[in-house]
Amino acid sequence: MDRRKFLVTSSASVAALTSPQVLKAQGAAPAKLFRWVPHADLTILDPMFSTVFITNIHSQLVFDTLYGLDNQYQPHPQMAAGHVMDPSGLLWKVMLRDGLKFHDGSPVRAADAVASLNRWAKKDLMGRSLMESTESLTAVDDKTIEFKLKKPFPLLLHAIARPTGSMACIMPEKLALTPDNVQVKVMNGSGPFRFLHDQWVSGSQAVYQRFTDYVPTRDKAKPEFTSGPKVVHIEQVRWQIIPDRATSIAALQNNEVDGVEQVDSDFLPILKKDKNITLIKRTLPSISLMRFNHLHAPFNNKLMRQAILAAVSQTEYMMGMNGPDFPEYWDDKCGVFVPGSPMDSKAGMEKITGKRDLARARAMIKEAGYKGETVVILDPVDYPVFHTAALMTVDLFKKLGIKTDLQAMNWGTLMQRRNSQEPPSAGGWNVTFTAITGSNNLDPAGHLAIRGSGQKAWFGWPTSERIEQLRLDWFNATSLEAQKKICSELQLQVFEDVPYIPLGATYQVSALRKGWVDFQEQMPLFYTLRKA
């Protein structure tokens, strides 16, 4: 019996596999409780210690930031009342709003913000860039934060508003003085939810209670992404950790949970037919990519990488990785940045969307002087989409005359193996696969895959002085139009140097029980969510 049929006929049996601790609630949920199955277990609480997405979502609930982003990814005051900047661009003052409190009741002070930003900047790519331009960051008084810059940094507000990477959240000074290589364990934020640490059981549940003393900003009439008034409509949000996807879907159908963050394509036909379920296409996709090792032959040769780019079909990879039934949930015209976002560009897209030419690719491989080296491809057999990508790549390389060694392993092993700079024959690798979340693909600041800084770059270690210069130019751009122009040039350079190949964008699908409305589509932050 296949997986889909099993769920249709036996969802009650599947639900019985769920632990009693997780699914003890039966029948309709209390009006003030929302039961949610997140995409992963919560194991790291510190918002600045890890860039793991589940930690980032947790942090957005418990903590707050000085500025937030709207739906066009522009910054707005959040904890800040506003800011002033002198004409030179070298002096910025950010003022805190009145009435801000941490969850322990203590007031939020400028000294807390300064200590928090200093800790954040040690971990975050954009934070480091900001601090390289900063002469001093001080608390002028309890309400005023002052940046004195060595040179203008036009994206200062964007930097401290970014929702991903290492989040620039504000915590009490005592916690913020924790060394950046030591995890903060006390969750004393000022966000719209309190984390109930005594109810947290890793592998089972995490519980968030509405913070009754939270004072929403009045900067905007309604919330957008991470900006605007965070007026919570639910007394409690309970994350119920159910690793098995089939079990979580059955729990949703049986009204044992109210929402599931990640719905695999296998389950879409079932849920589309269920009148009690609402499917939600998330607005920030992940971009899957084929990553080359630039240190070793044959992909230390740019012409070899360009040959693979000429042969890869995003349409074929997206259909193979996601299935052909629901093309509305993937995009096969994906460049460097999130499709449709402000930095997205059409520049050079014929390299991706043009007709695939295997004969030309084979000629390029011959011109590159390929000597028949065996290409080691890492295959995460427990990660279905990347396992499929690995198998498709073996087939493609065979057509191109490239010898391959497909090495099977689990995802955890692959994540360690990909950091090896050893030769492929000695435990290294040539090709692997991963995805970067849409919020990190919005601009050059957090986009790890484009970095061309050699040994300092993300795994694969590409070197491109031109890409690094364009990235720096983007940081210094003083207008949105200038930023867009630079991103077009940067995309052209990525297609020239080929640090990686984008395989397409996949939009995550979440599912809710009928009756829940106003779900936040970029990230599940719950302060917009309410009962109809």
Image: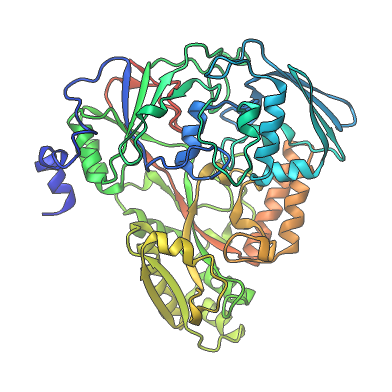
Q: Quadrant of the C terminus?
A: top left
Q: Is residue 116 left or right of residue 335?
A: right
Image colouring: rainbow
| Vertical position of residue 94 compared to residue 407: above or below | above
| Residue that extends furthest to the right in the rendered view of this protein | 88
| Vertical position of residue 147 compared to residue 285: above or below | above
Q: Which residue is at a point 13% across and 39% down the rendered structure image?
A: 16
Q: Position of residue 379 (x, y in %)?
A: 39, 67
The quarter of the displayed image where residue 70 is located? top right
Tell me, yes or no, if residue 70 can be seen here: yes
Depth check, front residue: 13 or 433: 13
Tell me, yes or no, if residue 356 can be seen here: no
Depth check, front residue: 107 or 29: 107
Q: Position of residue 2 (x, y in %)?
A: 15, 54
Q: Position of residue 301 (x, y in %)?
A: 63, 77
Q: Which residue is at a point 13% across and 48% down the rendered structure image?
A: 5
The quarter of the displayed image where residue 19 is located? top left
| Residue that extends furthest to the bottom in the rendered view of this protein | 371
Q: Total of numbered circles in the picture?
A: 0
Q: Quadrant of the N terminus?
A: bottom left
Q: Which residue is at a point 42% across and 42% down the rendered structure image?
A: 43
| Vertical position of residue 68 compared to residue 107: above or below | below
Q: Which residue is at a point 56% across and 21% down the rendered structure image?
A: 190
Depth check, front residue: 168 or 336: 168
